[in-house]
Image (tube, helix red, strand yellow):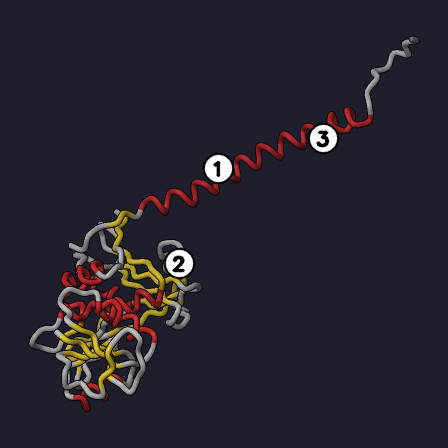
């Protein structure tokens, strides 16, 4: 499979590097105009089976290029085949695997500070004020991480599960790991939570539990 | 040498005698603080164990 990357910033570039080392990906192409020392740059997406991109503009670009998009946004926009491929989607995938999730929360340096209540994330993120909100119709608590680290947390009745890593590294893998959950129908990453989490683990994220 | 009935101590010995209870109490306090800090760091970190997604 050939994957075209819509060059739109740090997250997409990091995802491109994770995908270039993935066993189901034959080649990663950068859909220009762009310059790249690591990947071949192409003017259009005619060689690509899938596109991957982040940000609000990505679905419109994918629609124009006529190739399905893996996206980090929070809704099934036109042109998108897999959505929610972000740290928030990663946390919702963690929660989808728990029988009775009580809290699903994310702390990330790119998120805004919350004011609703306090959630204790694993070190080195620690305690942070979260905002209760919805992402793709699911409840999630979002906090701004005070440092460069990010944490996804799902608290169930029997255990807590978490992923903690550098925020930018986590965002890149959260986008890239959507490659293995592409199906016939448009879907968010947490609909195929196990496959998504397994791919994220293969790409370098580590999941931990506390019983 | 004539004995005037008083202990002959130098000025520094006298200072150590006066400060020794403070030094002992300070050492005990430092020990307790360090022990508490160790507990706070070690216990939460060791609770998290890597697992495969399943």
Mark-to-mark CA distance, 1 and 2: 23 Å
Instruction: Tell me the residue that label 1 is attached to.
Output: B35
Q: Are marks 3 and 1 on the same chain?
A: yes
Residue on which the image places disc 2: A125
* A92 versus A72 height, above or below: above
Question: Which of A11/A153 is in front?
Answer: A11
Residue A117 locus on image (x, y percent): 38, 64
Q: Residue at x 78, y 25 (%)?
A: B14
Relative horizontal placement of residue A173, taking residue A190 as reference (left or right) = right
> Quadrant of the rendered structure where residue A72 is?
bottom left
Q: Residue furthest bottom?
A: A64
Mark sitting earlier along the chain (3/1): 3
Residue farthest toward the left in the current orientation of the protein = A184
Residue at x 24%, y 69% (from the top left corner): A89
Q: Circle 3 sits in a helix, a strand or a loop, which is it? A: helix
Q: Label 1: how many residues lie within 10 Å, few (<14), some (14-19) or many (20+)?
A: few
Mark 3 chain: B
Q: Secondary structure at mark 1?
A: helix
Q: Mark 2 vs mark 3: same chain?
A: no
Callout 2 secondary element: loop
- Measured Cα–Cα span from mark 2 to mark 3: 43 Å
Tags 3 and 1 in contact by the CB under 8 Å rule?
no
- As drawn, A78 above or below A177: below
Which residue is at 15% across, 61% downward?
Answer: A194
* Quadrant position of residue A15: bottom left
Q: In front: A121, or A80?
A: A80
Q: CA distance from mark 3 to mark 1?
A: 25 Å
Q: Is residue A197 above or below residue A79?
A: above
């Amino acid at each position: 499979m050939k994957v075209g990357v819509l060059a739109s910033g740090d997250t997409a570039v990091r995802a491109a590097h994770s995908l270039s080392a993935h066993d189901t990906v034959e080649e990663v192409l950068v859909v220009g105009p762009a310059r790249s020392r690591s990947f071949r740059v192409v003017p259009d997406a005619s060689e690509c089976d899938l596109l991957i991109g982040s940000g609000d503009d990505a679905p419109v670009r994918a629609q124009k290029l006529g190739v399905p998009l893996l996206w980090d946004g929070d809704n099934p926009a036109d042109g998108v085949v897999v959505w929610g491929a972000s740290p928030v989607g990663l946390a919702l995938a963690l929660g989808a695997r728990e029988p009775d999730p009580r809290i699903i929360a994310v702390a990330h340096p790119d998120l805004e500070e919350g004011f609703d209540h306090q959630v204790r994330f694993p070190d080195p993120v620690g305690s942070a004020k979260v905002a209760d909100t919805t992402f793709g119709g699911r409840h999630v608590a979002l906090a701004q991480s005070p440092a460069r680290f990010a944490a996804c947390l799902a608290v169930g009745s029997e255990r807590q599960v978490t992923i903690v890593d550098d925020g930018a590294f986590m965002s890149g893998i959260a986008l890239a790991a959507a490659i293995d959950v592409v199906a016939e129908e448009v879907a968010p990453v947490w609909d195929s939570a196990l496959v998504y989490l397994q791919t994220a683990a293969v790409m370098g994220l580590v999941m931990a539990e506390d019983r | 040498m004539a004995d005037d009935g008083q202990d002959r101590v130098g000025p520094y010995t006298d200072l150590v005698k006066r400060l020794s209870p403070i030094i002992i109490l300070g050492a005990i306090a430092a020990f307790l603080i360090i022990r508490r800090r160790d507990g706070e760091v070690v216990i939460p970190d060791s609770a998290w164990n890597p697992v495969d997604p399943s």
